[in-house]
Amino acid sequence: MKILVTGADGFLGRRLCERLTQNEHEIVKFDRTQGDLTNENALRYPDAEGVAGQARHDYGAGVDFVYHLAARTFVPESWKNPHPFYQNNIMGSVTVLEFCRTNKIPLVFLSAYVYGSPKYLPIDEQHPLTAPSPYHMTKLACESLCEFYAERYDMSIRVMRPFNVYGAGQSEEFLIPKIFKQIFERNEIEVFDFSPKRDYIYIDDVINALILAQKPWTGLETFNIGTGVSLSVKEAIEIMLREAGVNKPYRETGQSRNNEIDDCRADISKATAVLGFVPQYSFETGIKKWLEECK
């Protein structure tokens, strides 16, 4: 297939494009060098902010499938400066939805964890939705847009909700790479709080889920992407130290983030039943793979 990937230069986008190329698909990349995705004409041709001298190109020509990954994602920044999150994430998604509607192309939209503090565990796709941050609010808004387009325009859209993704190449703003940096560069590891538990999913498993989402379907479908296992920050640090072969002290500062969630663990039975998704990496094996890639 000829597949358009937005956010192709991002943490997940780069790995997805590599896998799609290995699977012999033709990839059309849209990233920050291509222009502003919030421009309604962005997918018709690069706008004036694109690379100087770049040929004008109709992205709709022959595209069979779209992955929409482009978004601002760093949660703390969304609290400090929410406007660009709403502008980029929501209006960029409108551009993609209109592109898919006009060209009658199936869409996979990458959402996020949108459940807030769980009312029950594990969390299935029917769990009540809530936004623990402005970033998550943009994802909920985009999911509503996906639902509207699927119902009103008879579009095929799959919404993927990954839990806590980690892996080589992730920004050091995020917890797991931040811990790794301290393991190798500092005398002591410091985090805000040991207790919050998360369902950490290795990047290769997320990519596998996205690839499986190509299976034909109609209408709107939503899937959790996780492992079904949650670990505390303290447990994650201990595993990372062990896999890295490092013995180093670690401590918590006692700080907590806005709307901190105590525990989250995904029910992935729907993704397993419909897509055939089964995680291949535990946290231990994911960390081991990350360390091997960094050698």
Image: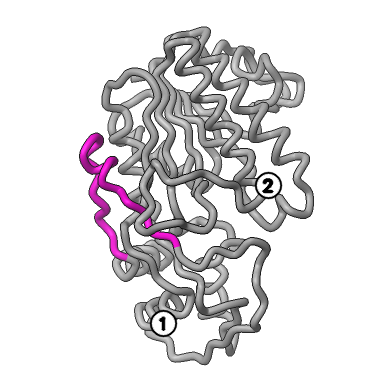
Q: 285 and 79: which one is in front?
A: 79
Give the residue drawn at x 42%, y 86%: 246
Considering only order in the chain, which callout, 2 or 1, is on the residue closer to the N terminus?
Answer: 2
Give the residue drawn at x 43%, y 74%: 236
Colour pattern of the rendering:
one colour
Image quarter for residue 98? top right
Work out which residue is located at the far front of the displayed protein and give it: 119
| Residue 134 numbered tag | 2
Q: What secondary structure prevails in the magenta region?
A: loop
Q: Under tag 1, what secondary structure?
A: helix
Q: Under tag 2, what secondary structure?
A: helix
Q: Give x and y (percent) for residue 15.
A: 42, 44
* Residue corresponding to mark 1: 238
Give the residue drawn at x 53%, y 74%: 179
In the image, which residues are magenta?
Answer: 264-282
Q: Is residue 99 visible?
A: yes
Q: Give x and y (percent) for residue 243.
A: 35, 78
Q: Give x and y (percent) for residue 61.
A: 48, 9
Quadrant location of the N terminus in the rendered image: top left
The three-letter amino acid code for the residue at tag 2 is Pro
The reply to whether the magenta stretch includes residue 272 is yes
The reply to whether the magenta stretch includes residue 212 is no
